[in-house]
Amino acid sequence: MSWLPPDDDLEDGFEGFDENSFRTRPNPKANRPRTKRRPAHDDAQIGRVLGVDRGRYSVMMDEHTADERAITTTRARELRRTPIVTGDQARVVGDVSGAEGTLARIVGIVERTSLLRRSADDTDLVERVIVANADQMLIVVAAADPEPRARLVDRYLVAALDAGIRPLLVVTKTDLADPTAFLSHFDGLDLRVFTSANDQMPLDEIGAALIGHSTVFVGHSGVGKSTLVNALVPSAQRATGHVNQVTGRGRHTSSSTVSLRYEGVGGTGWVIDTPGVRSFGLGHVDPANILASFTELAGIAENCPRGCTHLTDAPDCALIEAAAEGRLNDAERSRLDSLQRMLQTFADKADASTGSSSGR
Ligand code: GDP
Ligand code: ZN
């Protein structure tokens, strides 16, 4: 793979490149085993990467034992081009006691069960790795302020399903607006939705869903994600509210991705909090996987002609016919519109990269 500069040289921050940005174009050579023999590191211990800060990795060793501790590590030189992110299971050597003045280093990463990525926009081939090994994504939206955007949620859903991660949805600020109309967009989906009742978040139910899982929290900034994280993990002290105009502090303290332990009744789970983002680019997702994420529409599309684009001008598209013949309900029509807009951005991208102007 061709990489951007090593992330040691890069600033922390979601909008920056701390998440080990790299290019998505697969390079077959990159997967070939290296001929050079590497040290065996048989003595390596496995720890969980909690966070990354300027080239230093906070790693939890001996998780769930009396010796559990977070240590600071560096990364071995040979891993300079390997993205190591929150949630990774790192192989650590050296003095892993965490005692003052000791040094440990990461020499490898255990194969990941999932990898959540995003790009700045759909045309951007540079992707940011957000979290490794998460099995749930909790999407936070506000009923108002900021207005909920179904199409942004659809993007999160595509990213989650593409990565093999189960999505959950939380609606905050229901004291400000009724989210029923917004939520009807997702009626046909197998999506667990939590809404606050009487201005009170159902923390017990959300917490129960976190136990035994590694859940990445995503959302547009201002939706109340930090407020929710702090309520679930009181020690988190994630900064809330707006940037202090004088000091500029506030947002910055939550500009990197961190792992926090949820301690619930009957078990624990991992909350991985990510900085709020305005957009969630899917440049890394195979367009063929987008339709598959629209699970309630994918079945209908099986009757589409071969190679159907499902775009608004697609001839004999089964989805368009179903809509025209009144066979889609309101939610499905709304999702079809969202799907077509998303597919259109990919079609535009393909046109741009091939120089074609056929509009197909
Ligand atoms: P984040 O950017 O998503 O982390 O959002 P914050 O947690 O910082 O919250 C943004 C603002 O929304 C803060 O002023 C919160 O006090 C406010 N807020 C959070 N949850 C609620 C809610 O349920 N209702 C209302 N009205 N305001 C909320
Ligand atoms: Zn079609």
Image: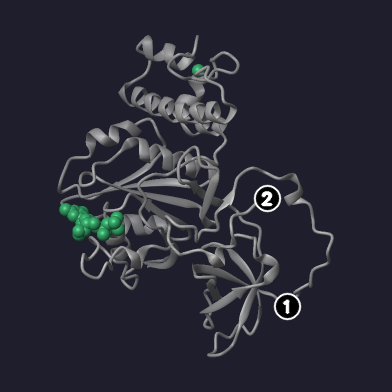
Q: Secondary structure at mark 2?
A: loop
Residue 119, numbered label: none
Q: Label 2 crowding class (10 Å Cα cut-off): few <14, some 14-19, many 20+?
A: some
Instruction: Residue type at mark 1: give it.
Output: Asp
Left or right of residue 272, residue 306 in this image: right
Q: Secondary structure at mark 1?
A: loop
Left or right of residue 264, residue 112 in this image: right
Q: In the rendered view, would you say 117 is above or below 272?
A: above
* Label 2 CB sits under 8 Å from any ligand 1 atom: no
Q: Which residue is mark 1?
A: 43
Tell me which residue sits at (50%, 70%) in the image: 54
Q: In the rendered view, would you say 146 is above or below 333?
A: below
Q: In the rendered view, would you say 171 is above or below 296?
A: below
Tell me which residue sits at (59%, 62%) in the image: 6
Q: Position of residue 317 (x, y in %)?
A: 49, 13
Cα distance in 3D space between marks 2 and 1: 29 Å
Q: Earlier in the sequence, mark 2 or mark 1?
A: 2
**Can residue 109 be seen?**
yes
Q: Label 1 crowding class (10 Å Cα cut-off): few <14, some 14-19, many 20+?
A: few
Tell me which residue sits at (42%, 37%) in the image: 190
**Can residue 200 be seen?**
no
Q: Quadrant of residue 342?
A: top left
Residue 1, numbered label: 2
Q: In the rendered view, would you say 180 is above or below 59?
A: above
For the residues labelled 2 and 1, say whether their Cβ atoms are less than 8 Å apart.
no
Tally of numbered tags: 2
Tell me which residue sits at (62%, 56%) in the image: 112
Instruction: Residue type at mark 2: give it.
Output: Met
